[in-house]
Every structure is written in structure tokens, then in C-alpha cells.
Amino acid sequence: MGPGRTVDQVWPAAPRSGARTRAEWALLNREIENCRACPLGSLRTQVVIHRGSLRPRVLFVGEAPGASEDQVGIPFVGPAGKRLDQLIGRLGLLESEFAIVNVIKCHPPGNEFSEGAADACRPFLARQVEFLQPIMVVTLGTAALAAFRPDLVPILGSAGRRFRWRGLTLFPLVHPASTARSGAFRRRWEADGAALSRLLSRLGAGGHAGTGAPSRATV
């Protein structure tokens, strides 16, 4: 993992003067859509910004969009997204309780994570977190964890444990795509997901029976 700025280092400096508005969110989305700060902006089919609530209690942060996400412009709609949706269903999170974003907003060719692209996207990620105001950030994969707490990498030493970041709960998980490649990662995903469920219960989130698979429509 190469050096890069953390979300802390690009956190919005100006204090917020008013309530969060949909107009502010729409403006941020337009800035992301128009970004050409790295080569991925000219290679993408669609920019991939967000799905879920604008007032989430839990924010899932992935690494970068895959080919499926590049086609539809929505995070985690491919095979890894199905595994994440299954976890969200088991957690009992209502659609109003969660949101999903990525560190990188455009699909990198060959799914090769680019630290240069991540660094260019980091201010957008910081502004998303600052706007959404979750009580918990759940990182998915090494690169997502490194965007917040590089001191906690490698991820296998940190996944499934509770940490603090800017007054929020930070809970790392392995990336759901890794579960398709390794039985060990699959077991780790299940065990750490169960630990996340217990933590959410203590925080008063999730646990809603019969929620089923979450909708992929944005709010």
C-alpha cells in the first residue's frame, strides 16, 4: 500500500454554517461527476457515488467500483454486492439506517486499486462522510481501512474489532469479494459479521426482523 493522504488530512476545513441540505448533496455529486483529476475520469462508463440513506447510522466504505458498478453507476451491485446485501439483511438494517460509498468513485481497469486515484478522490470521500454523519463507519478491505486508519493495516489484525475515528465507531471487515477466493476469508467474514451484529445491537441500530435483502435504489 503506497503512501496517500488519509480522510483526516483532507477533512473539510470550513466549519458548517447550516443544516445539511439535498442541494448541498447534489452539488457534491456534480463535482464528483465532473472530476477529471486522474485518468479514471476519462475511462469510466459512469461515476459511482452512493447508494442508501442520506441520514445513515452505518456507512459502509468499499475500495473501488467493479465492472458491474461501472455500468449502472451504483456501488456494490455485482457478486461482492450480493454478499454485502446478505450481511446487511442479517444485520437487520433498515434502508434508512445505512449507506454505501467507495474510496475511488470510478472503475479502475482490471480492478487494480490505484493509490493516485484514491488520493484524488479522498476529498470527496471526506465530504461524503462529513455530510452523511454516520455513527459508525464499516470499512470493506485493506484500502478502505487505510483511508481512515493506516495504522490498523494489515487488515486481518484489525477486522472484526471496534476502533475510534473522529469520535465515530470504526469497524473494519475484509472485502466481501475475498470470500469467493478463500474459505478462510469466508469464515472470517461470517465471524466478523456476527461481531458487527452484536455491536450494532448495543448501539441501538439494526436488528429489525424480516427486513430481507436491502433495496439498491438510492434515497
Image (cartoon, grey):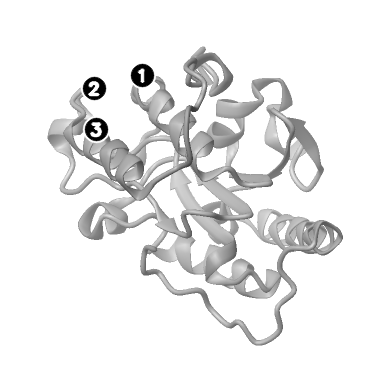
Labels 1 and 2 touching (C-beta < 8 A): yes
The amino acid type found where label 3 is placed reads Glu
Residue 12: percent from left, percent from top: 47, 21
As drawn, the label of residue 31 is 3
As drawn, the label of residue 116 is 1
The amino acid type found where label 1 is placed reads Gly
Q: Determine the image quadrant of residue 195.
A: bottom right
The residue located at (24%, 60%) in the rendering is: 72
Q: Nearer the viewer, residue 157 or 167?
A: 167
The residue located at (76%, 57%) in the rendering is: 196
Residue 63: percent from left, percent from top: 47, 40
In which quadrant will I find the C terminus?
Answer: bottom left
The residue located at (54%, 66%) in the rendering is: 96
188 sits to left or right of 86? right
Residue 114: percent from left, percent from top: 37, 26
**Label 3 or label 1, whichever comes before in sequence order:** 3
